[in-house]
Amino acid sequence: MPDIAAASDTLLLAAFAGAALIIAVLGSRMANIADVLADRTGLGEALIGSVLLGAGTSISGIVTSISTAASGHPELSVSNALGGIAAQTMFLALADIAYRKVNLEHAAASAVNLGQAGVLIMLSALPILAWASPAVTVFSIHPISPLLVAIYLVGLHNAHRIRQEPMWIPRKTEATRNEDDDECEDDRSTRMLFATFAALVAVVGVCGWVVGEAGVELSSRYGISQGVVGALLTAVVTSLPELVTTVAAVRNGALQLAIGGIIGGNMFDALFIAASDVGYREGSIYHAISDRAVFWMALVVVMTAILLLGLLRRERQGPAGIGWESTLLLTLWLGGAGLQIALG
């Protein structure tokens, strides 16, 4: 790998910006492929969005978190994971603005997304419990880390069961969009689509490594705290695929894919912390972070709870042209970002 630290300021910023651009451009192509595969496989937009699109678009973020944790920067690593979840949740508010017909959460009713949001709240709250608990480790790994992976897998199984045998059915209205209403056509075979998606994931992953290494170096050179760099710089950049794919999915009418991609991506992002704990060899990563990282943990729990309530309430149209939950999500993220910047 090239030595990022030896690069000039101009080259460093160019590498960071170039990686960000590639991540954003490839993200839209991943959304289109995921929409087609949702129809081809019969798994549905919410589940495909959660598993394939969510994990695929998150690859740059997990590479960033693991690489920075392994190089001894736990604050940047965890802040990148949590900042990414917060930013991606806020992206749904931007998608709501882009979808002018009705409140996005009303139109994209899905029992699967409700279940996934509940699992995400658990995944976001458990690191707080780890932080507040004794620094017990086994092979330098805190017991909460494997528990996060187990809950994620159980959550995916639960989502599949909800889709196959739903016990809650969203009330249909004239504004409710059924994912069966549109069929995405693509001449490429299913195998080719999967191969293309995998290739895009690989490229995005390499770009994620560049973003992470450049973020560490930028933090060092310009005296910016790693918490701010992680939560607001690398997190937003590595979350660009989620923004692009969400807006692209909304424009294509794949509303459940858009929300499922964000919630599923956030679930996968919660595993960044577990993976970072494995990569961090100096002990429990939960006890190597500052209060700022814990702030983002709590903020993510609140934002996800608001999203869940919005999906349940299904407001048709808010006073500002978007749902009340979207207004709150934007306000919370901007307030959190402003506070972190003010603290320096």
Image (cartoon, rainbow, N blue to C red):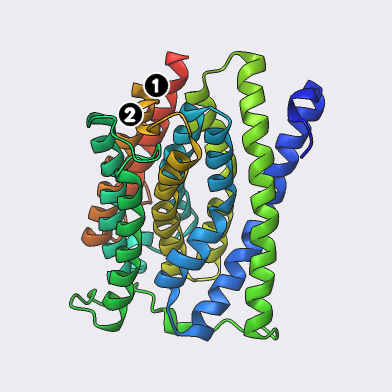
| Amino acid type of the residue that numbered disc 1 sits on in the rendered structure | Leu
Q: Position of residue 258 (x, y in %)?
A: 46, 63
Q: Residues within 10 Å of mark 2 (few under 14, many from 20)?
A: some
Whether 233 is drawn above or below 202: the answer is above
Any part of residue 173 in sight: no
Q: Position of residue 321 (x, y in %)?
A: 38, 51
Foreground pick, 253 / 260: 260
Q: Quadrant of residue 316?
A: bottom left
Q: Residue at x 65, y 82 (%)?
A: 191
Q: CA distance from mark 1 to mark 2?
A: 10 Å
* Outermost residue toward the left in this view: 167
Whether 221 is drawn above or below 201: the answer is above
Q: Quadrant of residue 30?
A: bottom right
Q: Earlier in the sequence, mark 1 or mark 2?
A: 2
Callout 1: helix, strand or loop? helix
| Amino acid type of the residue that numbered disc 2 sits on in the rendered structure | Phe
Image side of residue 73 versus residue 119, left or right = right
Tally of marks? 2
Callout 2: helix, strand or loop? helix
Residue 295 numbered tag:
2
Q: Residues within 10 Å of mark 1 (few under 14, many from 20)?
A: few
Whether 19 is drawn above or below 38: the answer is above
Image side of residue 222 versus residue 168, left or right = right
Any part of residue 38 in sight: yes
CB under 8 Å between discs 1 and 2: yes
Foreground pick, 45 / 9: 9
Image side of residue 44 versus residue 219, left or right = left
Foreground pick, 129 / 258: 129
Label 1, on which residue?
A: 339
Q: Position of residue 25 (x, y in %)?
A: 69, 54
